[in-house]
Image: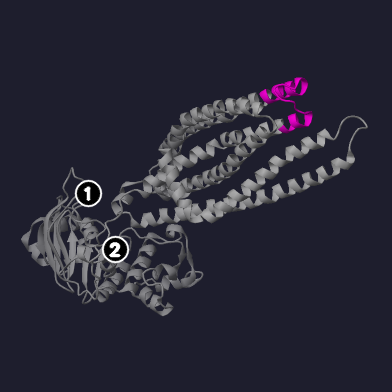
Amino acid sequence: MKKPILKRLIRYMKPYLPILTGAFVSAVINVLLTLYGPILVGHAIDQILGAGKVDFEALLPILVQLLLTVVGSALFQWVQAYCTNKSAYETVRDLRIQTYRKINTLPLSYIDAHSHGDIISRLVNDVDQVSDGLLQGTTQFFTGIVTILGTLLFMLSISPAIALAVVLITPLSIFVAAMIARLCHKQFIRQQAAQGELTGFVEEHISGQKIVKTFAFEKRAQETFEAINGRLYESGVKAQFYSSLSNPSTRFVNNLVYAAVAILGSVCVITGMPAALTVGQVQSFLAYANQYTKPFNDVTAVITQIQTAFASARRLFDFLDEAEETSDSPAAAVLHGAAGQVDVNNLGFSYSKESRLIENLSFHAEPGSHIAIVGPTGCGKTTIINLLMRFYDADRGTILIDGKDVRTVTRASLRGVFGMVLQDSWLFSGTVRENIAYGRPNASLEQVTAAAKAAHVHSFIMRLPQGYDTVIREDGSNFSQGQRQLLCIARVMLVDPPIFILDEATSSIDTRTEVHIQHAFDRMIQGRTSFIVAHRLSTIQNADCILVMNQGHIVEQGTHTELLRKNGFYAKLYKSQFAGAQI
């Protein structure tokens, strides 16, 4: 799996090839200057023949060269670090942007079926891990390759025999590192998966902390957290343990290289066999032996970050490879100026193949009509809304808006003709004005104020410390549920679309405010088609047509008076709310 992942990461880095080239050139110059240092040190040692026998005249130029070499090496090391950092962070920025863009192109079925915390973990934690791995890997790759090749050339120029001994021992270090890397790779994959699960659990329980406390679930939540955390701990410890073996193991092999060079070099100095060497040359060779083995030590020292990066990259690419929402047809038309006629013909849909939800559902809504959809929980009321908005596509049948199949128009234009207020209100971190103007960002303050007044929320807003400029905290936690829902209603009123969908839009509002809102809705939807999903049947008595659903079918339809006269399923629902009757 590593090779395909590495290839994909390299593709992301291609746009920054000039910067990477600069990093590579800087690495070459840096390493060459670094490698030239031991030669100068060896020459300097050879000018020190003994007590009182130092050739200062020859030594001084060597020391000046050595100083210039050190300064030049530091300069190009900085340039290499700058280029490497820039390319790595630019690459990760692109990867994070694409990951977030992917969220917006995924079908809602994926979002509904996966932990939101795990998705967040991929976007935040996994991308950060890839960033660390790219930074470490790129730095070690450039410096390591040049260092190994450079030191080999310099060692061969001093003593081919000793250089050959070094090369022969090196594969043992590579073999040890590769074996350990294979052992810990699976553990790093498990570690990142457990981290995603833990993030999801924490995100869910922080957002639902009131429910946790209400049901005294703290102890069981703590136990579940500790179980997930235990799996993360177990996989993390194993991953760290195996990876921690890499560095000492390769250092042991590399120390064997150093010892072999010291012994062979001493033999050469003493016996002149297989080649005569000076003490300074042996010192240079020992320095090169250290530099030659340093890349292997450096790679194994950061093996944890690199392995974690591969595991995180795999999770990211799995996410990016998920099937996206079906694209609009190239011939898809833009829906303009919809009058609001809706026809549903023989609709069939299910969320899973195992069980059918909606079968052979048909109804007709005239422009400007008010359609109410009622029925017991799970009968398919909200599913109809999802299908109308094309959050999901029907398995069979057609949905027509003004005679046009919704599959033949662009999703953006289709959703643009709908205004929807959901039971679950959603506000983002921003001002009250920004939240109301979410659908019309360029709306003036007067237009925002008019929408707020229509939703009977203006007086409440004016009592806030900064009025319309009051900042709403994340998820609107500094507002009550009813206040949040009123702001959501104002948001839709500002957009003023031709078709309205109200999915339990007043479920969190007190009865008195609901009466005001109902009057506001009556004015707002005058001459516009509206679909009202309701459990409180008192709110839909004036609907032009009430669709009564049960188990995915429309079992009755008609006005409130007509349905009561039939004394059927709707009448039982109605009586159950006002007389406590059992269905």
* Spatial CA span between label 1 and label 2: 24 Å
Q: Residue furthest bottom?
A: 446
The residue type indicated by label 2 comes to Ala
Q: Nearer the viewer, residue 91 or 290?
A: 290
Q: Nearer the viewer, residue 69 or 355?
A: 69
Residue 197 x/y as whole percent: 41, 41
Query: Of 172 and 512, which appears nearest the observer?
Result: 172
Q: Is residue 62 above or below residue 255?
A: below
Region of the chain picked out in magenta, as a range: 260-284
Q: Which residue is mark 1?
A: 351
**Secondary structure type for disc 2:** loop
Prevailing secondary structure class for the magenta stretch in the rendered image: helix
Q: Secondary structure at mark 1?
A: loop
| Residue 38 in magenta stretch | no
Q: Residue drawn 42% across and 58% down? A: 475
Q: Looking at the image, tell me whether mark 1 or mark 2 is earlier in sequence order.
A: 1
Circle 2 residue: 505
Side (left or right) of 537 relative to 193 = left
Can you see residue 542?
Answer: no
Whether residue 318 appears in this view of the structure is yes
How many numbered discs sit on the rendered protein? 2
Q: Residue at x 70, y 32 (%)?
A: 158
Q: Crowding at label 1, few (<14), some or many (≥20) Cα neighbours within 10 Å? A: some
For image coordinates 75% across by 31% down, the residue present is: 281
